[in-house]
Image (cartoon, helix red, strand yellow):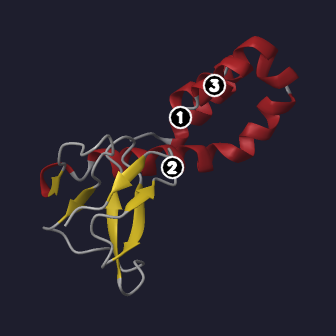
Amino acid sequence: MRSVVAAYVLWFFFGLFGAHRFYCGRVGTGILWALTGGCFVIGWIVDAFLIPEMVDDCNREYAAFHSHGAGYRNTAPEHGVPIAATNSVMHPPPEVARGNRVVFCTHCGGSMQVPRGSIGSAYACPSCGTVLRVPA
């Protein structure tokens, strides 16, 4: 998990080289910052306000990808379409709409809600675009 304090320290001392962006997993813009001196210092200043959101996004992605380990099953791809990981042990979070369930992308770990009766249907992951088949 990433720390906002560490991100601000990196931003202050090495922000013109994009260190805080690399720390938050934003490699593309980190390279841009390194090549342009923090987008000619303007981007470096704007990042002072964006760092908490960058750290939160990074931590959410990390948690979605790593925290579900043993309770989730991941079946082999069928006809070139990966099967989404689903959780039969834990209950869905309260923000899941009635009649839906949460499935997780086997490629990036992103979550999405699908209708309960959609077993075998294919859906695209909203995070990475990988097409997934909903498991039973």
Q: Position of residue 96 (x, y in %)?
A: 40, 78
- Classify the position of the C terminus by image quarter: bottom left
Say whether disc 2 or disc 1 marks the residue closer to the N-terminus: 1
Left or right: where 18 falls relative to 61:
right
Left or right: where 34 falls relative to 109:
right
Which circle marks residue 127 in the picture? 2
Q: Is residue 56 above or below residue 118?
A: above
- At horizontal 35% and vertical 85% (from top left) the residue drawn is 99
Say whether disc 3 or disc 2 marks the residue closer to the N-terminus: 3
| Residue 79 visible in the current orientation | yes
Left or right: where 21 falls relative to 32:
left
Q: Quadrant of residue 118?
A: bottom left
Q: Quadrant of residue 72?
A: bottom left
According to the image, label 3 marks what residue?
Answer: 28
- At horizontal 73% and vertical 40% (from top left) the residue drawn is 48
Rate crowding at label 2 as few (under 14), some (14 to 19) or many (20 or more) other CA atoms within 10 Å. Answer: some
Amino acid type, mark 3: Gly
Q: Position of residue 73 (x, y in %)?
A: 15, 53
Amino acid type, mark 2: Ser
